[in-house]
Image (spheres, grey):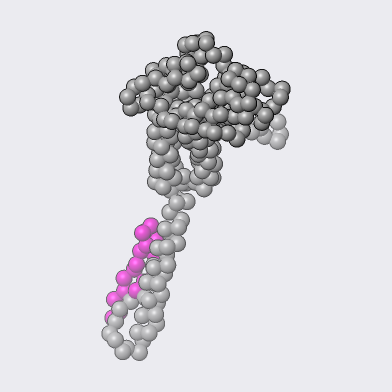
Amino acid sequence: MWSAFVVHDEDGRTVGPVATGPAGGGGAAGPATQGAGGMAGLMTGRSTFGGNKRRRTAAAGQGLSEAQEGKIKLAFFVAIVGVILTVLGVGTEFWVQLSPPKSFYNNQTCLTAHYGLWKGCTKILWVADIDPERDSCGPAELPGESNCTYFKFFTTGENAVMFQKTTQKNLNVAAAMLALFSLFLMVMGAICITMALSKEIVFFLKPASFCFILSGVLVLLSLMVFHQSVLALLASDHTVPLHHELSWSVSCVGCAGAVLVVGGALFILLSLPYSPWQRCLPHRSSAS
């Protein structure tokens, strides 16, 4: 008598019977072949069923479908653009440019300055290189002799002096700390999105949205505090008339704050259990 047992896969479905019997029997070839085919079907079935596990989990409401994963990656790309703009703006020193009149020092050279959150630079420009229609010295992108130094706000606590004007270290330090904390929140949000995509858990989208929205608000707040520090610098002394203008680093930071808030809002929409478009704009039947 042949003893047969049935092999089941991980979902409880029958793959095929495996028969055992005495070796060398004439009638054992058919059942043995069928048993070997059943074992081969089990081995191939594991990979097939493993590939369909994601689809079954998403259908049961416990994971992410391919459409959801694509939307999350698209929103994550938007947030990453905001992160890159923030890093570019925070790491550069072209937040504001300070320029006295062209003829304030002499008729051949003039002095301009630009600084950011961490360091300031002074630059000697040739008056002949400046646009004749421009009254002040600059812009700082012109070729000239430059000298850059890091602020001593974060080491000895000393204020910086530019054109006989003194900075307000409390405002400058506050703007820098807000920018750093916003970068920390961006990293936390990126970790949450990575966990959501790898573990297929929608719950991680909510803390990620909170991190990105709050980081965007802090970036914009840092920009406002920095602008107040510039106004305080200009009001500290009126001996040297200065013309100030915000530069391209501020534009990067402002755009980054807006992009981060938009990215966080997209994650909130993706974390909802229903589609807001279908809820707000229900599909009407063709008869109506």
The residue shown at (49%, 32%) is 147
Q: In this rendered view, identify the residue nearer to me: 212 or 120.
A: 120
Check if residue 224 falls in the magenta segment.
no
Quadrant in which residue 107 is drawn: top right
Q: In this rendered view, identify the residue nearer to me: 89 or 195.
A: 89
Quadrant in which residue 258 is drawn: top right
Q: Is residue 284 above or below residue 159?
A: below
Quadrant in which residue 254 is drawn: top right
Regarding residue 40, the answer to whether it shows in the image is yes
- Count all numbered tags in the image, as a single digit: 0
Picture coordinates of residue 70 (x, y %)? 53, 45
The residue shown at (41%, 27%) is 151
Q: In this rendered view, identify the residue nearer to me: 54 or 134.
A: 134
Q: Quadrant of the C terminus?
A: top right
The residue shown at (39%, 80%) is 33
Picture coordinates of residue 238 (x, y %)? 52, 10
Regarding residue 214, the answer to whether it shows in the image is no
Q: Is residue 102 above or below residue 190?
A: above
Q: In this rendered view, identify the residue nearer to me: 3 or 206.
A: 206
Q: With 267 as the anchor, is 18 left or right in this view?
A: left
Taken as a whole, is the magenta stretch helix, strand or loop?
strand
Check if residue 4 falls in the magenta segment.
yes
Q: With 40 as the anchor, is 244 left or right in this view?
A: right
Picture coordinates of residue 240 (x, y %)? 54, 14
The residue shown at (55%, 21%) is 98
Q: Quadrant of the N terminus?
A: bottom left
Picture coordinates of residue 189 (x, y %)? 42, 36
Tell me the magenta residue range.
1-18
